[in-house]
Image: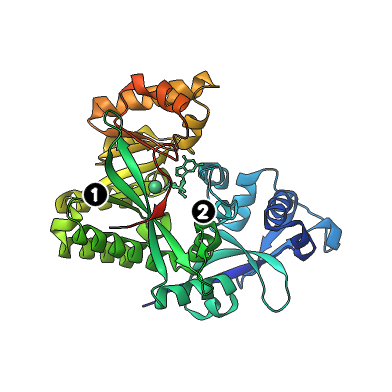
């Protein structure tokens, strides 16, 4: 059953900003969020009143992101905001990770920020990108790319990470930032995660020597039905599921530790491995390393990028790796892009590397 989300509309009148591009519009919108008053009406419609529109001046102007969060019913907005990996391909992801999305109304061209919450299917009809995604899911146009994760000693692949791509109607391939935000705001991310998982299992089945990893998003894990479906698929294909690693981001572990912990226990019973993705990208919690039954930690690529320029980046990688070793958790350095980065990392005895230097995401060909 397809689920989607209904939106509480925050009318921030950003349609003029559209011409500056979506990124510009987004940041202007966020700035405006910080500098405007909001009020949540009983019917759930959230109005933003800004000075330019002369609606009315603020009485209790939120002074920071957390105050703003209190106004709009999002706890810890600041943490959530900064817990979002900054390397996300599109900043649209930042909004969707904190429960908002940026949507252009097809009819009016207005750009609005919308708050996500569960509802029925109808809104997909008004959301062009979500509609395209739903169509792609229905027409089996979701395909897998994969990127090698290599052993840090032999440089041979120990596993490949599956990355979802979408074949557009014209045959070109859409990159994640073109459809993930729509997937998140429409709730289709659950279908997308499950589809990716199924495709990954099918690929393992066709080539038993292959280990694959697949990503499961925050929204999917938080949804009981989607979580149960994932566990049931894995149980049903237990032999091949043992060649699978599921990557979850640390955000999940921080915000819903119990859910993440139970999910980890279920995976362990089946024999599916669990990896903590983008570790260090946001607010890092050692609790997730210590108390979650994870097999692997993937050290966020921003530290690798800075490893030769910033001592703190090197120290972070080295400390996380040392702690992981002590806890019996494997470590992966993400986004290794060149020989210099690899050579700086080699003496640390990290277990595995991933990144363009060892292989870019390519269509899976097994
Ligand atoms: O969050 P996660 O680690 O799952 O992100 C995977 C994304 O990272 C993919 O979209 C992939 O294209 C990208 N990626 C993989 N390796 C590199 C790299 O070496 N450099 C950069 N900039 N991006 C990478
Ligand atoms: Mn990943």
**Front position in the image: 11 or 17:** 17
Q: Is residue 300 toward the left or the right of residue 86 in the image?
A: left
Counting from the top left corner in percent of width and height, residue 270 is at 16, 54
Q: Quadrant of residue 233?
A: bottom left
Q: Residue at x 32, y 27 (%)?
A: 350
**Would you call the spot at circle 1 few (<14 residues within 10 Å), some (14-19), or many (20 or more)?**
many
For label 2, the SS is: helix
Image quarter of the N terminus? bottom left
| Image label count | 2
Q: Residue at x 26, y 31 (%)?
A: 154
Res. 49 in view: no
Counting from the top left corner in percent of width and height, residue 100 is at 57, 59
Image quarter of the C terminus? bottom left
Viewer-nearest of discs 2 and 1: 1
Q: Quadrant of residue 54?
A: bottom right
Mark 1 C-beta to ligand 2 under 8 Å: no
**Front position in the image: 218 or 356:** 356
């Amino acid at each position: 059953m397809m689920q989607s989300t209904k939106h509480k509309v925050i009318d921030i009148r950003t349609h003029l900003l559209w011409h500056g591009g979506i990124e510009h519009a987004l940041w202007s919108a966020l700035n405006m969020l910080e500098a405007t008053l909001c009020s949540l009406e009983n019917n759930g419609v959230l109005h933003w009143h800004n000075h330019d529109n002369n609606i009315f001046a603020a009485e209790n102007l939120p002074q920071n992101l957390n105050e703003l969060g209190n106004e709009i019913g999002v706890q810890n907005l600041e943490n959530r905001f900064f817990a979002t990996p900054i390397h996300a391909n599109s900043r649209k992801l930042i909004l969707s990770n904190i429960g908002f999305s940026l949507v252009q109304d097809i009819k009016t061209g207005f750009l609005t920020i919308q708050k996500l919450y569960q509802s029925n299917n109808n809104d997909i009809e008004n959301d062009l990108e979500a509609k395209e995604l739903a169509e792609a899911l229905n027409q089996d146009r979701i395909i897998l790319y994969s990127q090698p994760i290599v052993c840090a000693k032999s440089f041979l692949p120990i596993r490949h990470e599956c990355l979802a791509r979408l074949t557009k109607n014209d045959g070109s391939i859409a990159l994640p930032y073109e459809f993930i935000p729509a997937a998140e705001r429409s709730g289709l991310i659950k279908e997308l995660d499950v589809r990716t998982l199924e495709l990954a299992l099918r690929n393992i089945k066709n080539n038993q020597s292959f280990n694959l990893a697949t990503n499961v998003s925050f929204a999917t894990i938080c949804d009981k039905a989607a979580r149960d479906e994932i566990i049931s698929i894995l149980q049903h294909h237990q032999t091949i599921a043992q060649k699978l690693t599921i990557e979850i981001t640390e955000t999940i572990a921080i915000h819903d530790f119990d859910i993440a912990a139970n999910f980890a226990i279920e995976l362990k019973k089946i024999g599916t491995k669990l990896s903590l993705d983008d570790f260090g990208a946001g607010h890092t919690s050692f609790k997730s390393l210590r108390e979650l039954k994870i097999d692997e930690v993937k050290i966020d690529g921003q530290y690798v990028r800075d490893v030769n320029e910033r001592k703190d980046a090197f120290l972070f990688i080295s400390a996380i790796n040392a702690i992981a070793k002590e806890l019996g958790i494997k470590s992966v350095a993400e986004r290794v892009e060149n020989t210099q980065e690899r050579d700086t990392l080699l003496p640390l005895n990290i277990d595995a590397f991933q990144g363009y230097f060892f292989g870019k995401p390519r269509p899976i060909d097994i």
